[in-house]
């Protein structure tokens, strides 16, 4: 199962211990997980639930030697989904539902979660599902932004009980395939990465352009940027980033720290001096985020 940047594997029972350890690590080391997702070791996700998902073939893993990401994609929906007014009126066994999406604390904010959601959509299509849905706690605002940025539409909420949260509100989302979504080459600040010399040099393996770009960026930023630093597959895509994007870009760092997909999600964007400087020199970047 492949996309351009990602390969997922179905978990086998032999992976059970590693998957359980992965989720425990996510719970222990993810900043503010108690505030947003409110997962608790032993309560959610449970060991029994993880084993059941593996046994039914709905647990998927993203590995880079070790497990980097995990999620469940069921080819059915439960009764909790019946009360929502969905875009499509389809049977329970015509719906794919995404559950337990998690990324290693060491690799969060790299776009891996978004890539996994896109793979879940592809898996659903491959199995002939007519709709893709999910739910998230009302408090999990970073997840809401990711899902909405990928074309999922909020369809309603329910006040439900879960062992790790007690009675609380859950938001329900459905993929709206007619909804226009921002192409992945648009960077966090709004600049189209496909027009960036670093991206072009990487795509074409153009060493001369790498050297020219490194020299210019080193002068502009008064930083030791070398040709080997000019390798980038896009600000919001998985893969390589330039030294500038990964280490020096204050706009990208700010958005990732605040949990925004792009500066377009930030309520302070109109008064922000960081992205404002970019927009003053590139008006199209601002338009791209609208």
Image (cartoon, helix red, strand yellow):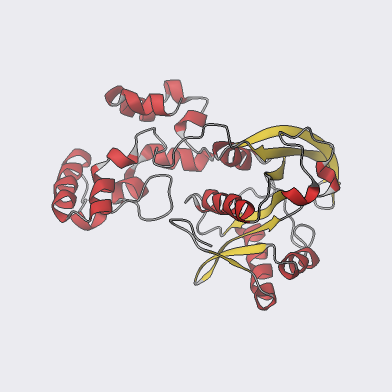
| Residue found at x 67% / y 63% | 59
In the rendered image, is residue 230 in sight?
Answer: no
**Number of disc labels:** 0
In the rendered image, is residue 194 in sight?
Answer: yes
**Position of residue 166 in the picture relative to residue 181 (left or right):** right
Furthest toward the front, the residue is 128
Residue 106, x across and y down, in percent: 51, 59
Which quadrant of the structure image shows residue 87? top right
| Residue found at x 27% / y 25% | 281
Which quadrant of the structure image shows residue 172? top right
Q: Quadrant of the N terminus?
A: bottom right
**Position of residue 88 in the picture relative to residue 22 (left or right):** right
Q: Nearer the viewer, residue 120 or 149?
A: 120
Residue 31, x across and y down, in percent: 60, 51
**Position of residue 262 in the picture relative to residue 151 (left or right):** left
| Residue found at x 20% / y 51% | 224
Tell me: residue 267, above or below residue 45: above
Residue 78, x across and y down, in percent: 82, 49
Tell me: residue 211, above or below residue 181: below
Q: Nearer the viewer, residue 201 or 254?
A: 201
| Residue found at x 30% / y 46% | 244
Furthest toward the bottom, the residue is 14
**Position of residue 267 in the picture relative to residue 29 (left or right):** left
Residue 108, x across and y down, in percent: 52, 53
């Amino acid at each position: 199962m492949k996309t351009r940047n990602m390969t997922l594997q179905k978990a086998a029972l032999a992976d059970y211990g590693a998957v359980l350890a992965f989720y425990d690590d996510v719970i222990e080391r993810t900043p503010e997980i108690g505030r947003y997702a409110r997962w608790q070791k032993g309560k959610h996700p449970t060991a029994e639930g993880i084993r059941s998902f593996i046994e039914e073939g709905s647990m998927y893993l993203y590995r880079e030697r070790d497990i980097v990401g995990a999620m469940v994609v069921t080819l059915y929906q439960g009764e909790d989904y019946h009360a929502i007014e969905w875009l499509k009126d389809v049977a329970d066994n015509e719906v794919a539902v995404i559950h337990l999406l998690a990324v290693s604390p060491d690799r969060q904010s790299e776009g891996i979660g978004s890539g996994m959601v896109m793979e879940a959509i592809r898996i659903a299509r491959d199995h002939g599902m007519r709709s893709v849905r999910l739910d998230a706690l009302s408090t999990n605002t970073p997840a809401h932004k990711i899902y909405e940025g990928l074309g999922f539409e909020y369809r309603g909420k329910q006040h439900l009980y879960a062992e790790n949260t007690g009675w609380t509100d859950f938001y329900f989302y459905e993929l709206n395939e007619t909804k226009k979504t921002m192409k992945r080459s648009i960077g966090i600040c709004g600049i189209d990465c496909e027009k960036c010399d670093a991206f072009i040099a990487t795509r074409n393996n153009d060493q001369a352009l790498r050297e020219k770009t490194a020299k210019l960026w080193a002068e502009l930023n008064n930083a030791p940027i070398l040709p080997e630093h000019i390798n980038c597959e896009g600000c919001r895509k998985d893969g390589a980033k330039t030294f500038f994007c990964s280490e020096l870009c204050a706009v990208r760092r700010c958005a990732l720290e605040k949990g925004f997909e792009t500066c377009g999600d930030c309520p302070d964007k109109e008064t922000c001096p960081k992205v404002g400087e970019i927009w003053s020199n590139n008006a199209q970047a601002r338009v791209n985020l609208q």
